[in-house]
Image (cartoon, grey):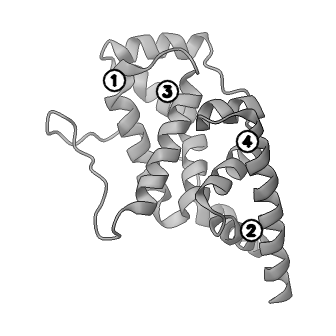
Amino acid sequence: MSMQSNDGDKLLIDRAQGGDKSAFEALVRKYQDRVYNICRYMLGPADAEDAAQDSFVKAYRNIGAFTPSPGFCAWVTRITINTCLDYKRRPRHLPLARISSEGDEYDLDEPFSGPGPEDLLASRQAGAVVEQAILRLSEKLRASLVLHEIEGFSYEEMASALGISIGTVKSRLFRAREELKKLLDSAREHL
């Protein structure tokens, strides 16, 4: 699945930049599964929905600053990765802000309608073991693995979304796979 913005995205972005909330909500519906999955694998199921919603709130607040390159998907992916990193750094008792610059709380009309991670993994113990192993990877390695192996990003798309070179993408992905293999081998020994 290519992450480059298509003509439909461009029209929606232009309308959203003009203040059309329904256009932005259409972008949310299009990318919500991808954003949610990134958050789920970066943070785990407990914070995934909140982080995904916060990612879209940040995108909404900054839609005026969006430029066509690198494309909407890469832009919202970078926001999502940064939001996940913010979640990892914040004290556990402090939520991230959800208040607009005008002081109003912004809530999307249609929050994530897909099945939650518990539903997806409930019948597969192996899925839970893999997810736990992914969560044990460093943030940089986890982001690389999630974007390539789970979301299907190409090296070029990953480089754009993460703001790193293709060589660094390949290196991180190699190290992520090696580390994940070690973690899974260790988990298998303890089963």
Cα separation, mark 1 vs mark 4, equals 35 Å
The secondary element bearing badge 4 is classed as helix
Q: Decide: marks 1, 4 in contact (CB < 8 A)?
A: no
Name the front one of labels 4 and 3.
4
Q: Is residue 112 left or right of residue 190?
A: left
The secondary element bearing badge 3 is classed as helix
**Numbered circle sitting on residue 72:** none
Name the front one of labels 4 and 2.
4
From the viewer's perspective, is residue 48 above or below residue 157? Answer: below
Task: Residue 164: name its quadrant.
Answer: top right
Q: Decide: marks 4, 2 in contact (CB < 8 A)?
A: no
Type of amino acid under label 1: Lys
Residue at image mark 4: 169
The residue depicted at 41 percent of the width and 46 percent of the height is: 53
Q: Is residue 105 left or right of residue 157?
A: left
Cα separation, mark 4 vs mark 3, equals 27 Å
> Dot 3, how many residues are within 10 Å of its Cα: few (below 14), some (14-19), or many (20+)?
some
Residue at image mark 1: 21
The residue lying toward the viewer, choosing from 124 and 171, is: 171
Q: Decide: marks 1, 2 in contact (CB < 8 A)?
A: no
Cα separation, mark 1 vs mark 2, equals 38 Å
Q: Earlier in the sequence, mark 4 or mark 3?
A: 3
Type of amino acid under label 2: Val
Cα separation, mark 1 vs mark 3, equals 10 Å
The secondary element bearing badge 1 is classed as helix
Q: Quadrant of the C terminus?
A: bottom right
Q: Decide: marks 4, 3 in contact (CB < 8 A)?
A: no
> Dot 2, how many residues are within 10 Å of its Cα: few (below 14), some (14-19), or many (20+)?
some
The secondary element bearing badge 2 is classed as helix
Q: Earlier in the sequence, mark 4 or mark 2?
A: 2
Q: Earlier in the sequence, mark 1 or mark 4?
A: 1
Residue at image mark 2: 130
